[in-house]
Amino acid sequence: GIQVEQSPPDLILQEGANSTLRCNFSDSVNNLQWFHQNPWGQLINLFYIPSGTKQNGRLSATTVATERYSLLYISSSQTTDSGVYFCALRTGGGNKLTFGTGTQLKVEL
Amino acid sequence: NAGVMQNPRHLVRRRGQEARLRCSPMKGHSHVYWYRQLPEEGLKFMVYLQKENIIDESGMPKERFSAEFPKEGPSILRIQQVVRGDSAAYFCASSPRGLGQSYEQYFGPGTRLTVT
């Protein structure tokens, strides 16, 4: 099956800093989503981005499907950004999402 | 704008009991997916259902686990004779479209099952 690797696995930031999270995948995809799992365990949809670039406030994402990677940018980070960030992919004619290994982010004052 | 609803949010069962987890998809969504998240791990696909049909159960354990999505009412994930290894967070997701089409999956808040 498809391999999905995220980097870095752990990240500690000072409030106000910017960061880039990366998602590499081993096969072509027709659905890519980014999620934030907050410290209470809830999964929050951030982006649906099988290709191209999208922005939502302090967050933006870019997927380069031909090179099999996606990037999530967080600018001016806040403590509420803490949690785990997952990318998840759907491939071919399948229907299930395959989740990446996650990036654990902690934003400190 | 109600999202995906799951209940209960927390469930404690003793070994050998049955656990029933419920999921109501977003309004207008007829495709439901169940995922399991073991402690300190990512989410793993279990099963994909449409109304009255199981489409893909390739991620379901072969024994003790079953799922349904009846014509009326929520989707149910049933775990019989629970064991401690079943302790996990179980997430339900829904989408307006399914196989072969572009769509986004929306997740519920999850049910945290603890087996004592």
Image (cartoon, coloured by chain):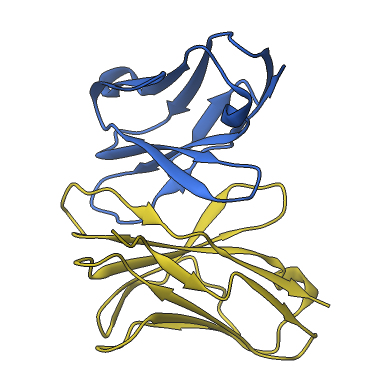
Chain colours: A blue, B yellow
Q: Is residue A1 visible?
A: no
Q: Is residue B38 visible?
A: yes
| Left or right of residue B14, residue A72 in this image | left
Quick check: B110 above or below B80? above
**Furthest-top residue in view?**
A17
- For the residue pair B48 and B108, the one nearer the viewer reads as B108
The quadrant in which the C terminus of chain A is found is top right
Q: Residue at x 29, y 64 (%)?
A: B26
Q: Position of residue B59 (x, y in %)?
A: 49, 65
Quick check: B83 above or below A47? below
**Furthest-left residue in view?**
B101
Res. B5 image quadrant: bottom left
Q: Position of residue B79 (x, y in %)?
A: 60, 83
Q: Position of residue B42 (x, y in %)?
A: 59, 47
Q: Residue at x 38, y 63 (%)?
A: B4
Q: Position of residue A2 (x, y in %)?
A: 43, 41
